[in-house]
Amino acid sequence: MNTEENKNIDASEELTEVTETAETAETVEIAETAETAEAAEPAETTETAETAEAPVNSKADKKSEKPKKPAKKKFNVRSFKHGTLSVVLTVVFIAAVVLVNVIVGLISERFDTTADLTDTGIYSLSESTEKYVSEQLASDVSITVLKTEKEFEEQGTTYKQVNEILKKMNMASGHITLNYLDLDQNPNYSSRFTGETIDEDYIVVESEATGRHRIISPYDYFSFNEEYLQYYNYYVVEGSNIEQAAVSAMMYVSNEDLIRVAFTEGYGEEDSSALQDLLTKNGYSVETVNLVNVSEIDPDIDIVVMYAPSMDVDNENISKLDKFLDNNANFGKNMLYFASAQQPKTPNIESFLAEWGLSVGYSVIGQSDENYLISNYTPYAHLQQICDTEYAGTAYGSPLYTFGADLRPVIQIWDGGNRGSVETEVLMTTYDKAFLYPLDLGEDEEFAYEDAESGTFNDGVIAYKVHSDTQAISRLAVFGSTQLSNSTFMSLSNANNQDFFINMFNYITGKEDSITIKTKSFSNVTFDMNAQTANVLAVVLCIVIPVVVIVLGIVIWVRRRHR
């Protein structure tokens, strides 16, 4: 019994020693493993399994067992770096996208980043407009559209075109400020324009420097189909006049020394609205003066225009014209007189013209050469020749045509055209083989072409006086027909009539910033793209861009895969 107990005690002690040795060894192994390897959990699993195999036969074994602390994972610097770098790159990318959007927004507000693909360029500034706003406009002006930009453009493509042109003007000049104003939110704005019509979609152009303003209505910046308007009283937008209207308004409000042109009335003058519109669009201040109702013509007026009166002017009012041109012997004033084939004889006007060495023949000019006829139905509508004078400017030598009809000859009554202080200069003539048809031909008289006076005749002549001391000049220009400046001939795309007249007014007054701008039509607007351009766009959009995106995606994926 004792022997067996002693054996058991010895065996127990040996087992305890073995267990302690194994435990100590296992502890050392765990420590080494924790220091040298990242996989601590497998070591703990092994230790647990070995401990489970060792028999626990006494309280001493339980006491000898000590609670084991879980192995601490080592801080992974590499993973931390990669994670931090990913976050930083993401933040940088988002910041870059936001910054690019801000920069693009600023650039698009200041510079034109759009492309006009229409064949007629309805969304682009004409060369004349761009030159004026970028080079000739010298003072600050503001353009205010009386509606929010979004609401204005949502009314249709015609309004969008107007807005695009205004924005391009703003981008092209540092002197233009473009604003949008909701009248409903600013009810007091209209009170600034007492006595003037103002409403939504109107555009107000102002200058603080001169204190002047001009209001542009949709009827000013759109052109309408005349047939619908005449027969159905229905407005159909056919084209855009926003460039003419806006540039004209800027010229008017910004010019420090405004040039005044007065058209006479009271003697049955013909309709001069086309010439008035041309002058208005080029920054002139146009008004009317009734000779009967004024004691004298305002000396601040620069030019007087008499447009084919249907009755003769009495001597009292003729003297007002004389006094105006004399300007208290200071000169520096100008007058244009237009005759008409529909006028009766006007002896008082003829006497006034004669003092300047000019006369208007009481006949109408026809053309026998069919090469110069405008219409095959009448010989009295034919092409004219602009003479090489400084009054003509770029209209001389232009490839465009000068149209005229029902012209009366303007005659230089002095030999050589000059007498004393008065000199004359021819501005426009007919082509050769023209003839004169007498306006006073009796009903019983027959007209014989072979007997008619023929050759080349003057359509327009200017006479002038130069002040001996100041060199100031007073001028009187006479034209044989109002149809040289009517709406039909001045609106033709192949005519230079309006170029001639605006150049003449500019030269007379010393004005240099005038321009002529054509109406932009909305009819038959297409996107002009040839086959070569279409193929290039197809390759870029369908092949180049997708391939670049795919390649970039693969490169990024491979690089991230091998990190």
Image (spheres, grey):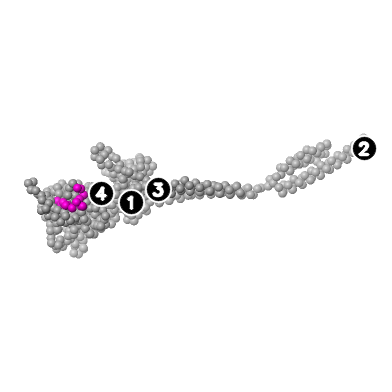
The secondary element bearing badge 1 is classed as loop
Q: Which residue is mark 2?
A: 3
Would you call the spot at circle 4 few (<14 residues within 10 Å), some (14-19), or many (20 or more)?
some
Q: Which residues are magenta?
A: 364-376
Q: Of residues 165 and 187, which is closer to you in this image? A: 165
Q: Pinpoint residue 362: horizontal percent, then vertical percent.
A: 12, 52
Counting residues from the start of the chain, the first of labels 4 and 1 encountered is 1
Q: Which amino acid does the dot numbered 4 rest on?
A: Leu
Q: Which amino acid does the dot numbered 2 rest on?
A: Thr
Q: Which residue is mark 1?
A: 126
Q: Quadrant of residue 203?
A: top left
Residue 366: say if magenta: yes
Check contact, mark 3 vs mark 2: CB within 8 A.
Answer: no
Q: Quadrant of the N terminus?
A: top right
What number is the disc on residue 531? 3
| CA separation in Å, label 3 and label 4 | 33 Å
Residue 465: say if magenta: no
Left or right placement of residue 39 versus residue 159 in this view: right
Q: Which amino acid does the dot numbered 1 rest on?
A: Ser
| CA separation in Å, label 2 and label 4 | 140 Å
| CA separation in Å, label 3 and label 2 | 114 Å
Would you call the spot at circle 2 few (<14 residues within 10 Å), some (14-19), or many (20 or more)?
few
Q: Which residue is painted at 52% across and 46% down in the image?
A: 550
| CA separation in Å, label 4 and label 1 | 17 Å
Q: Which residue is most to the top?
A: 1
Q: Which residue is mark 4?
A: 492
